[in-house]
Image (cartoon, grey):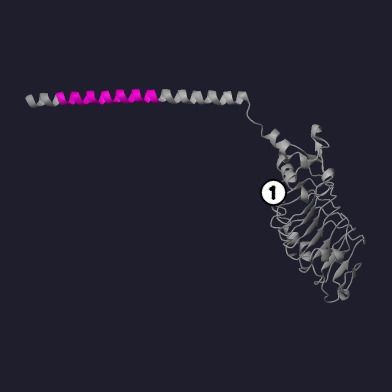
């Protein structure tokens, strides 16, 4: 996906870049600020998140640095932030608290970092998020099913070129506005654990970027096949129809249950008859004893 200029991209996403107070007076060291509320800190070899960022900042670009952490305390002071580019750093961890107060954030780029796992509810606070780029993290192998929960505005999601072998389709079903999805370049394992994902891709192909490039890496017999055409095949393999032996087994089980029920019913009937006879016999003996007492 080609990167559009910042202002053009935000206009396309429906965010107005309104003029505001100038930022130059409080611009962090080694960053450039302008009157459009943009703070540009890209390519400065920063190892620490820029301190004392102007509170009105709308766009923050800290790409191509050496950051290994996004401090929630500092980041969440930027409540008006709409555009955040953190690509090409050394980030390995983000959580729900990282973005807790960024309710106006529209664009987020976390590509080219060192993420291993995206935890549950990580992006939940981002109620206005429209585009999320999470590509080119070679160690990223797991995205929690609720990572995007409540991100109802998310339209573009790109998780290409990571180390994903499976993706819980619940994470995608929770995105009602999703219209573009990038999945290519991952080592997808095409089996019963990806059956639901393949079925979803097969029915919603119109949302799917690089359809021809999203292929299976394992098992060997599936290698090179497209995920978007495997849904029905996997459904048949993972939920096979019953064969003749299965039907014979069910018939045999039914016969055994029927026979056992019949025997139990017969035994219960015999016991009831014997019990009834015993009661009658006992009552007859009592009547005879009472008659003898009367005669005496």
Picture residue at 77% right of the left edge, 40% below the top: 229
Residue 40 located within the stretch drawn in magenta: no
Q: Which residue is mark 1?
A: 170
285 or 177, which is in the foreground? 177
**x, y percent for residue 199:** 72, 42
Question: Position of 178 compared to 61: left or right?
Answer: left
The magenta segment is 265-288
Look at the image and tell me whether residue 260 can be seen: yes
Look at the image and tell me whether residue 296 can be seen: no
**x, y percent for residue 240:** 66, 32
**x, y percent for residue 73:** 76, 64
49 or 85, which is in the foreground? 85
46 or 276, which is in the foreground? 276
Q: For residue 104, which quarter of the picture?
A: bottom right
Quadrant in which the N terminus is drawn: bottom right
Quadrant in which the C terminus is drawn: top left
Q: For residue 211, which quarter of the picture?
A: top right
**x, y percent for residue 63:** 88, 59
Q: For residue 195, which quarter of the picture?
A: top right
SS at circle 1: helix
Q: Please, is residue 148 above or below residue 281 in the view?
A: below
Q: Residues within 10 Å of mark 1 (few under 14, many from 20)?
A: some
């Amino acid at each position: 996906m080609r990167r559009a200029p910042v202002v053009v991209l935000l206009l396309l996403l429906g965010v107005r870049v309104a003029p505001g107070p100038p930022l130059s007076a409080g611009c962090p060291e080694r960053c450039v600020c302008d009157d459009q509320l943009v703070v540009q800190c890209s390519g400065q070899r920063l190892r620490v998140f820029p301190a004392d960022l102007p509170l009105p900042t709308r766009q923050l670009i800290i790409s191509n640095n050496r950051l290994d952490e996004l401090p929630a305390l500092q980041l969440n002071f930027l409540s008006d932030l709409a555009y955040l580019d953190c690509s090409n750093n050394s980030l390995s961890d983000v959580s729900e608290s990282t973005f807790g107060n960024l309710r106006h954030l529209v664009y987020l780029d976390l590509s080219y970092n060192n993420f291993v796992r995206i935890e549950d509810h990580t992006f939940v606070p981002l109620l206005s998020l429209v585009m999320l780029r999470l590509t080119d993290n070679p160690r990223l192998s797991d995205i929690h099913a609720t990572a995007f929960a409540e991100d109802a505005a998310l339209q573009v999601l790109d998780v290409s070129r990571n180390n994903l072998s499976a993706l819980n389709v619940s994470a995608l079903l929770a995105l009602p506005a999703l219209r573009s999805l990038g999945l290519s370049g991952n080592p997808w394992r095409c089996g019963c654990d990806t059956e639901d994902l393949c079925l979803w891709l097969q029915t919603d192909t119109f949302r799917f970027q690089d359809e021809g490039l999203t292929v299976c890496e394992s098992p060997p017999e599936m290698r090179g096949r497209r995920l978007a055409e495997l849904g029905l095949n996997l459904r048949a393999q993972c939920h096979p129809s019953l064969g003749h032996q299965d039907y014979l087994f069910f018939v045999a089980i039914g016969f055994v249950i029927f026979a056992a029920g019949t025997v139990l019913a017969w035994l219960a009937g015999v016991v009831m008859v014997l019990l009834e006879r015993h009661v009658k016999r006992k009552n007859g003996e009592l009547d005879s004893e009472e008659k003898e007492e009367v005669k005496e």
